[in-house]
Amino acid sequence: MGTEWDLTKGVTIAIGGAAGDGLDKTGDTLARTATRLGLYAHAFNSYQSIIRGGHIWLKIRMSEKKMHNIGDNTNVMIALNEDSLERHAREVQPGGVIFFNSSKVNCDPLLVSEGVQSLGLPVKELTKPFGRVLPVMQNTIMLGALLYWLNLDFKMTEKVLADTFGYKGQDVIDQNIAIARAGYDYANENLEKSGIAWKFSGVRRPFVTGNETIGMGAVAAGLKLYAAYPMSPATSLLHWMVENSEKVGVAVKQAEDELAVVNMAIGAGLAGVRAMCGTSGGGFALMTEAIGMASIMEVPVVIVNVMRGGPSTGLPTRTEQGDLNQAFGASQGDFPRIIMAPTSITDCFYTAAEAHNLAEEFQVPVIILSDLLLGENPETIDSDALNAEILINRGKLLSEAPEGYKRFALTADNISPRVLPGTPGAAYVSGSDEHDEEGVLISDEFTNEAIRRKMQEKRMAKLDAILQSLTPPQLEGSAKAEVTLVGWGSTWGVINEAVAQLTEAGLSVNHLQIKYLFPFQAEQVEKILSNSKRIIVIELNSSGQFARHLRAETGIKADDTILKYNGEPFTPGYITQSVQDIVEGRALSLDVSEDEAGQIAYHYIRVKLGNDARPVGYEQVSLPDYDEPLWQVSIVGRKEGEPRGTLLIGVQTGATYTWQENTPEITKEVN
């Protein structure tokens, strides 16, 4: 269709359906086909916290060059149900294509943008030669059609299917391959090909998630115990550990709750075992008192918080960077701890390894703040990206106790030598109360202000030593840029691409990404940002938690913030447009956009109208009985297109006001 494809930036394929429709298997087959051919793949799965039903939206970006986010556009769509067409068909860009099952779904031409092909595959007819097949096989039919349009090697997909279904026997493998071939052949006869001409390197690369690489990094650093209670989106880290525990020599314990989990890990650390536990924000909230206990007992332990949307249960299957304040405030009182946020899936590996070394060297708890975006969504990494030869530093761990051994000795470097429990001549008390050098409590009968002061100073002095051991932050781009974008943790990849877009648009931009959050490298960060003309902090929360932290630690107030808190990750284009708006002086509007009015209307339809209607028209109006402008949304029946009614939605509040049947005439003043 004459589209010029920049394959270094890639093509993005979206699959829409419901939980239970098998999207993950289809996406996995496509991604593994691409990666075995030598392409890079980056996936993001927006899913619901139910086993069946709801709406799933999986996107895969395939490219010849390594990309670090899902990108801005949708080029291809596989719609497994009508709801997905209603929600997303308009997102497909000109030159792209929409595949759907014409045996059960209608694709209204009004949903398809100009320049976009649509192909209904008669799944029932195409699968007839194979006898009775499961409904999920519609995915395989459409996968075959997609392979044709994308100009991918079908034989490679055959190998992927053979590996995937090998445990079910050759008959199942042959059936899947034959059904995919039927879709491929049907597209060949009925669809104009994309014209995409990939350069396949043939280099096979790992396709992994951040949770998996955190597990690998911890194992490489000598992890021996992992404890967890299942909590999305940290659960897949537990799954990886269970699956590989015998192979890598790690004991895995699923406890009854997060209180038990963190105390198991602390107990293991006290016994000299490298230990880690994992959870998300709600579970981390239960762990916080124990984290303080680990610090006063000077026990090394690593806690992974894979963040999701809060507060409370919040958004169990959506991403957010909302737990930074929680990590700062974990437990009561002042105590040393390390908080670090990996910046990429590769960095998850090295962060986990470094966390265990830091925990033992300084005898402190280390908190890793990952999130759903990094933790659960896989991408291709280079084969040599992960180096298992990790230098292990166990700090002042003695093999035998010196004469007069004191576990909490006050030393010149503020680190007390430790020995394993049971070492002759090294008996001591390790309690959660304040204590002297030998562990004798000074919180009751032997209260002593002088010892308390020196013990607290000793523990807190570790922070200075920790700072000296951390890798300094690095500014990416020219120090003389007009705008400095500052992010932390998982936003590195998307900010990196936004910088490229802004540079291409003629704006001078550089980028500082923060990994170490506490103790904070204030001196280095302040030095870097002292030359910045305009500082914009970018983070996935609603209050600008890091922007506040930056000001508290350095005195530097960000000129602006770009915040997102709807549960979805940033895209490069979102950041690019937001930066341009800030630079050009356009005020941020919190009004409900037309697209958001559509989302609110769809929610009303699903909850109140049996999900058999759709919005087709949006008009902003003012009515005398309302204190704000309104979106007047026209809604029609999904199948026949007959008028069903009008929904009024507040432009400022987002409130759903009234549903009026059969589109009654409304006297209105158009804004």
Image (cartoon, rainbow, N blue to C red):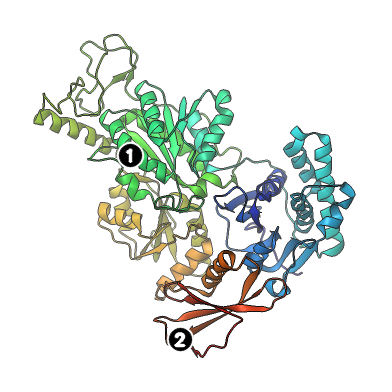
Residue 183 in picture, x, y percent from top left? 82, 54
Element type at mark 1? helix
Q: What label does residue 288 carry, if any?
A: 1
Q: Nearer the viewer, mark 1 or mark 2?
A: 2
Packing grade of label 2 (10 A; few <14, some 14-19, many >=20) is: some
Who's the residue at 87% across and 47% down the image?
130
Check disc 1: other Cα within 10 Å, few if <14, some if 14-19, many if 20+.
some
Task: Judge by depth and name the residue closer to the eye, 637 or 622.
Answer: 637
Q: Residue at x 29, y 49 (%)?
A: 522
Query: How many numbered marks, from 0 up?
Result: 2
Look at the picture and state if 657 lies above or below 54. Answer: below
| Callout 1 amino acid | Thr
Viewer-nearest residue: 590 or 360: 590
Q: Kindly identify the amino acid type of the residue bearing the numbered disc 2.
A: Leu
- Percent x, y for residue 31? 67, 48
- In space, the residues marked 1 and 2 are separated at their CA atoms by 51 Å
139 left or right, relative to 360 = right
Residue at 33% x, 39% y is 288
Task: Tell me the quarter of the picture where residue 176 sits.
Answer: top right
Above or below 7: residue 654 = below
Q: What element carries label 2?
A: loop
Q: Can residue 145 be seen in this view?
A: yes
Left or right for 35, reference 166: left
Image vertical order of residue 351 relative to residue 127, above or below: above
Residue 623's disc is 2
Instruction: Report x, y in % for residue 609.
Output: 60, 68
Q: Is residue 46 toward the left or the right of residue 415 in the image?
A: right
Farthest right residue in view: 129
The percent coordinates of residue 471 (x first, y second) are 38, 41
* Viewer-proximal residue among 347 and 542: 542
